[in-house]
Image (spheres, helix red, strand yellow):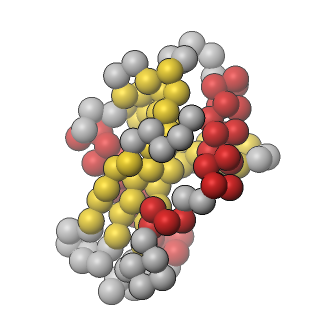
Amino acid sequence: MVDLPNISLGKSGEKIAISYLTSLGYKIIDQNFRFRGGEIDLVALDGGSLVFIEVKTRKSEHFGRAEDAITATKRRTLIRSAHVYKLTHKNLPDSLRIDVVTICFTNVLSPQIAVYKNITL
């Protein structure tokens, strides 16, 4: 198991997610967008879609899989955050999508990465 503080773990996960998503053709346009009601980890363009990306990083699956942390409440918050972002950032595609990237550091040299596209909208 990897011994990283949670903040470092989260930041490391986001860096890995950016690198991985870029290799898949995503164009990252914003990071850590915050407003009163929520936060979006990454915002990207993928083809003709504006994609809002939640990054979930875990040291292990001892307390559950990262994707299990995307509850119905979290999905509602992501949807609301996506709409606020779109309203405050004009001239972006109208096609919206929410993706989740999960990263598990069971092996620090080769973390497991998964992308779940279009989880809701």
Question: Which residue is more in the foreground, 32 or 51?
Answer: 51
Q: Nearer the viewer, residue 15 or 75?
A: 75
Left or right of 29 in this view: 20: left
Q: Is residue 1 above or below residue 55?
A: below
Q: Quadrant of residue 105?
A: bottom left
* Residue 93 placement (x, y as % from top left): 50, 17
- Name which residue lies at 52% across and 27% down: 96
Name the residue: 39% across, 42% down. 117
Which residue is found at the position 25% from the left and 38% from the top?
24
In the figure, is residue 111 to the left or right of 6? left
Image quarter in which the N terminus is found: bottom left
Tell me if residue 67 comes above or below residue 36 in the rendering. Answer: below
Q: Is residue 93 above or below residue 99?
A: above
Residue 43 can be seen in this image: no
- Nearer the observer, 30 or 77: 77
Can you tell which quarter of the image residue 83 is in? top right
Residue at image x 27%, y 32%?
25
The residue lying furthest to the right in this view is 36
For the image shown, how many numbered marks are present on the structure? 0
Split into 4 quadrants, where in the image is the C terminus? top right
Looking at this view, name the residue that lies furthest to the top.
Answer: 91
Residue 75 x, y percent position in the rendering: 61, 49
Residue 46: in sight, yes or no?
yes
Q: Position of residue 63 (x, y in %)?
A: 48, 82
Left or right position of 53 against 19: right
* x and y percentages locating residue 115 in the rendered image: 34, 50
